Amino acid sequence: MQISRNQFVVLLGLVCLLEVGNSTVPFTKSGKKFVAYFLPQVRRVNLDILFQRAHLLNIRKKLKAGKGLSKHELYFLSNMAKWYKLPADTPAATELRQKVFERIELCVERCDVIPEKLVLAQAIVESGWGRSAAALKTKNFFGLTQRRANNFVVTRSETTTYYLKSYSTLNEGLKDYMRTINSHAAYKKFRYMRGIMRRAGKEPDAELLAVGLIRWSELRELYIEKLQMVIRNYLPKDIEV
């Protein structure tokens, strides 16, 4: 019986998962080196997001108290809406308060951190612990693609070719990666789950939120299992650099 390439990849992944099981995998020297390089950048981008989120929450608090918003606050809100791909037009004065409040709620849902262990797990899976030559050249460790042509072809069919996105810095690549999760319709479930955790007073959980990225890969459930396996078995509980 012949099997397709995709079926072979799935079977190979299942074998890897069975081999690892639930045992703790030693955190190798090369693994530590990759985390030492990658983690501070992840924390820097997440910190920027937290500052923006805090500003949004302050604006929401101010609006709930019946206070008006400054031009600077409206400008900031408009920029956040554009960044997270929400309507950024200026509503009419008669609709201003309600429209602005709705916009803040949508921005707050999207303007939030991606757990650093989940970011690391995706980077590890997508770039082979940062050893992928293409990832190193493009500063794209997550397999993000585009249709605009460059030198890094990912997939090609008779009608469409996808290319690996390229960034000038790792920071730029991380920002686009986080923006993708925080704005793309495919990851609405991720944002919904994270919002539930926030409303329950909990920090976003990397292993649980991995489920919200099921549409990141054609492998679907197997991809989620791979991410969760990396989080559980490869990354130490108390990551330090």
Image: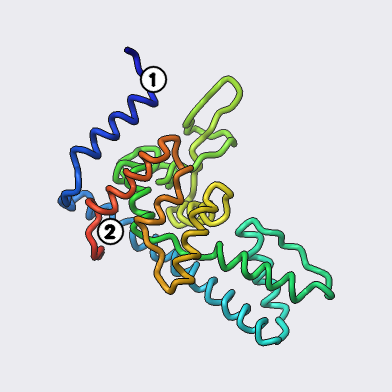
Task: Tell me the element at label 2.
Answer: helix
Quadrant in which the C terminus is drawn: bottom left
Residue 131: % across, % down: 30, 41
Most foreground residue, 177 or 151: 177
**x and y, in percent, of residue 145 in the image:** 51, 39
Mark identifier at residue 22? none
Look at the picture and state if 22 lies above or below 11: below
Residue 38, quarter of the rendered image: bottom left
Q: Which residue is drawn at 42% across and 47% down?
A: 139
The tag earlier along the polypeptide, 2 or 1, is 1
Is the image coloured rainbow, by chain, by secondary structure, or in one colour? rainbow
Q: Which residue lies furthest to the top in this view?
A: 1
Labelled pair 2, 1 in contact (Cβ < 8 Å):
no
Look at the picture and state if 134 lies above or below 59.
Answer: above
Position of residue 223 in the picture relative to residue 234 (left or right):
right
Q: Which residue does the numbered mark 1 point to in the structure image?
A: 4
Q: Residue at x 67, y 81 (%)?
A: 63
The three-letter amino acid code for the residue at tag 2 is Ala
Residue depicted at x 65% and y 71%? 76
Residue annotated with mark 2? 36
**What residue sits 73% from the left and 84% below the top?**
68
Quadrant including the N terminus: top left
Q: Is residue 206 left or right of residue 160?
A: left
Q: Quick one: SS at disc 1?
A: loop
Report how far apart the C-alphas of labels 2 and 1 lie in the structure. Answer: 38 Å
Percent x, y of residue 59: 62, 79
Foreground: disc 2 or disc 1 = 1
